[in-house]
Image (cartoon, grey):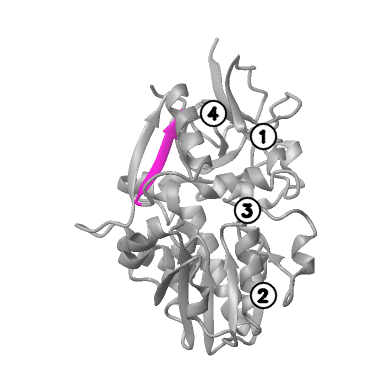
Amino acid sequence: MSTTTQLLVRKDDLASSKVRTADDTPLADGQVRLRIDSFALTSNNITYAAFGESMSYWQFFPTGEEGWGAIPVWGFGSVVQSLHPGVAVGERLYGYVPMASSVVLSPERLSPARFTDGTPHRAPLPAVYNQYFRCASDPLYTAGTEDLQALLRPLFITSWLIDDFFDDNGFFGARPGVALLSSASSKTAYGTAFRMQRREGIEVVGLTSAGNRSFCESLGCYHRVLGYDELDQLAADTPCVYIDFAGNGKLRRAIHTRFSQLRHDCVIGGTHVEQLAPPGTAKELPGPRATFFFAPAQIKKRTEEWGPDVFGQRMVQAWQGFIEKVAQPGAPWLVAQHHDGAAAVQAAYAQVLGGHGDPRIGHILSLSRG
């Protein structure tokens, strides 16, 4: 009998993890088993865990163990068993998977390019996370860049939507003005900056730690890079918006306290888990209340306004321009590092959770190899 190996984490203590291997259950009619060949692990996945309860991320892949969760990740896999007439063994897929060696899916609403997982418990969850892309017909797929796709594709789509959201809302009255992006070395932040730097009247300012400053400056997508303690280099009455990729409560307080013309505070992620502000803290700050950005809502809005074909074409065009820049010969923004096997995966998880490492390195993990 085949088995599945999975990395589980404590929902109330993300630093506690364990590896579990269990026998696979037989497939039911209409199901397929996907061998997960590789998946990316980024600070975005730590955000999924940090907001696992409030944003329902723990519900995608229930573990059956009280208190233990499976963090969703984005990866590639091959169908190794199929009891579905529309999905063949050997087909390659990209999508939302657990940190595991395999997963069982129930394909529904099949098209040449994708299908939806119809597993009942996923029905009430955001549809964007339940789609699996069939690589043979996926316009965003290229065979030679799977690692970069796993690392950047979901993040860049979020970046593209963030930029579109702010432009759609006229930067909330802060144009001309400044867009402040925290955690500027993170992939979602520099993807946003890559798009936003083209917006007329907006100075894109990256906020980062001293250790990541030179990396952020080398990207060329920020008009200016400042340390977290250098907010005083911007005038206090500067019209600005804050795009928070870190969840750092101390930094949020400093920004709200300094900038009298702060027009919008947009929460994207929570990678600084130990510094996440307690619930209610942000309500006490001057200026606009922090508002969580939910990418599926902007996808829904633009799909309705533009139509799905135009939405898809614009996204593909934006992605191709970004990936060309990231993978540029001689000076790539990101290089993949592989971690195969349970011990390596567990160690890589601890490293990413701790926020350590070179921002030029992207972590690609596999529990089906090694």
Residue 150: percent from the left, percent from the top? 44, 46
Q: Is residue 363 magenta?
A: yes
Going from the N terminus, do you reach mark 2 or mark 4 first? 4
Q: Name the residue under label 1.
A: 13
Which label was assigned to residue 100?
A: 4
Q: Answer above or below: position of 2 versus 311.
A: above
Image: magenta residue range: 360-366
Please, what is the dominant secondary structure of the magenta stretch?
strand
Identify residue type, mark 4: Ala
Q: Do the residues labelled 4 and 3 touch (CB within 8 Å)?
A: no
Q: Is mark 3 on a helix, strand or loop?
A: helix
Task: Give the label, 4 or 3, closer to the camera.
Answer: 4
Q: Mark 2 points at which residue?
A: 257
Residue 217: percent from the left, percent from the top? 34, 67
Figure quadrant of the N terminus: top right
Going from the N terminus, do you reach mark 2 or mark 1 first? 1
Viewer can see residue 303: no
Q: Does the magenta stretch include residue 112?
A: no
Q: How far apart are marks 1 and 3 (CA)?
A: 28 Å
Identify residue type, mark 2: Thr
Question: Of 50 and 99, which appears nearest the observer?
Answer: 50
Q: How far apart are marks 2 and 3 (CA)?
A: 36 Å
Task: Give the label, 4 or 1, closer to the camera.
Answer: 1
